[in-house]
Amino acid sequence: MDMCSGPILKKMLLFAVPLICSSILQLLFNAADIVVVGRFAGDNSLAAVGCNTALINLLTNLFIGLSVGANVLTGLFYGAKQEKDLSETVHTAMLISIFSGMILAVGGALSAKWLLTLMKVPGEVLDLAALYLRIYFIGMPSMMIYNFGSAILRAVGDTKRPLYYLTFSGVINVILNLCFVIFFKMDVAGVALATIISETVSALLVIRCMMREKGGIQFIPSRLGIHRDKLLKILKIGLPAGLQGMIFSISNVLIQSSINLFGAAVVAGNSAAGNIEGFVYVSMNAFYQATISFMSQNVGAGKYERLNRILFNGLICVIFVGLVMGNGCIFFGKNLIGIYSSSPEVIEAGLIRLKYIATLYAIAGMMDVMVGGLRGIGYSVMPMIVSLIGACGFRILWLATVFQIPEFHNVQSIYISYPVSWILTFSAHLVCFIWARRRMSDRVKSVSV
């Protein structure tokens, strides 16, 4: 896709819609894990799978953040038509993905039960949760390869083929879930094993796709290697993004630990509602990804006059999606949570979360689009610092102060911290973007003079 000319909104939608479909399908397949164990293995198994989400994100976000660096750098060289640099970026990024996956596989499997114990996971679900996590992390190399490969394809405007590959592997995941849990009675182990197999299929399909490409984007295994200058640039952009995601996850782990204090029913309801909200989040996140890719290609091509319009279109799209889908989750909340569990206690707990978080979820999308705008023009440390202070720091402070007051020591108080932190962080990102664009305009003027 040529992101450097023509109508922005139309092309942004053409980019984002397949990505939304891809992300929703991925969540549907992940939801199949929770639905199958919730319906056929019980609420403890549902809680065991659900309480791992924050921890998995904590351990993977650092390396997934590096794929953001690969995405931006690929977009810059693709927009500038620098084929040699593009090829070196592709092969450096893919080798990083392999190393990342191996580190996560070993580290996650060895530390699973210890980490879950630190999170105060209820005793009745601890062993099941640890078993699920150990098996899940064995598949990390495949997950990292798919994430880096699809990030590279997104950078050049290709969001359709990752959608096709994810659809195929996801169908495999659902079929294996049903077989392993219902027929072979493997409980959470069956769900984790099905995930590993499906992720391996999607990784192989992405590699096959990239090997058949032409030009700098083509992946040739014999050229795998670390090009120092490309590695440093990927780290410069991706490491702050990864650290931000990781520390975000630390705050979410602390929040999950606080939620765990209220028992298995609340944990299960929170997991189900969080999974439902995930569909809204990934739909909004598609415009974050679009903003990064459009920004980086236009910066590479020197089309600075298009940058503000790209950001504006990203914000309009994410507000619409967030308001419609977020409030739709509340309207259909009881029926949606009922898919995961028939327990009245679990459904009630899930509805409480949706009421406090889904209503204003559009603000979280706006916050992310601002981050995408800053990263797309080359600023990665600034949004990391703002996000860590405005979102993570605020939530941790909230848990340490407001949540400790007896009358606010309830799950509703925890959920309120989310929208308040989104408003604060979005406002700060907006100020930072205005400053960064003015600085960029001043540099362009000085060069032209």
Image: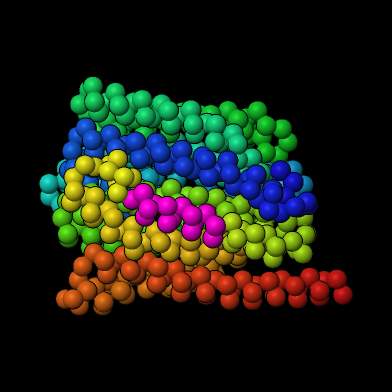
Q: Determine the residue positioned at 53% across, 45% down.
A: 20
Looking at the image, how many numbered discs can be counted on the residues?
A: 0
Dominant secondary structure (helix, strand or loop) of the stretch shown in magenta: helix
Quarter the C terminus occupies:
bottom right
Looking at the picture, does residue 396 appear above or below residue 256?
A: below
Is residue 412 visible in the rendered image? The answer is yes
Q: Determine the residue positioned at 43% across, 31% down.
A: 170
Its colouring scheme is rainbow
Q: Determine the residue positioned at 46% across, 42% down.
A: 24
| Residue reaching furthest to the right | 449
Q: Position of residue 134 (x, y in %)?
A: 27, 40
Report the side of 254 relative to 94 (left or right): left
Is residue 62 visible in the rendered image? The answer is no
Q: Determine the residue positioned at 37% across, 29% down.
A: 174
| Residue reaching furthest to the left | 124
Looking at the picture, does residue 93 appear above or below residue 374?
A: above
Q: Position of residue 36 (x, y in %)?
A: 28, 34
Quarter the N terminus occupies:
top right
The residues colored magenta run: 319-333
Q: Residue 123 lies in magenta, yes or no?
A: no
Q: Position of residue 191 (x, y in %)?
A: 29, 33
Q: Residue 326 lies in magenta, yes or no?
A: yes
Report the side of 156 relative to 119 (left or right): right
Q: Position of residue 100 (x, y in %)?
A: 45, 45
Q: Quadrant location of residue 342?
A: top left
Looking at the picture, does residue 423 appear above or below residue 304?
A: below
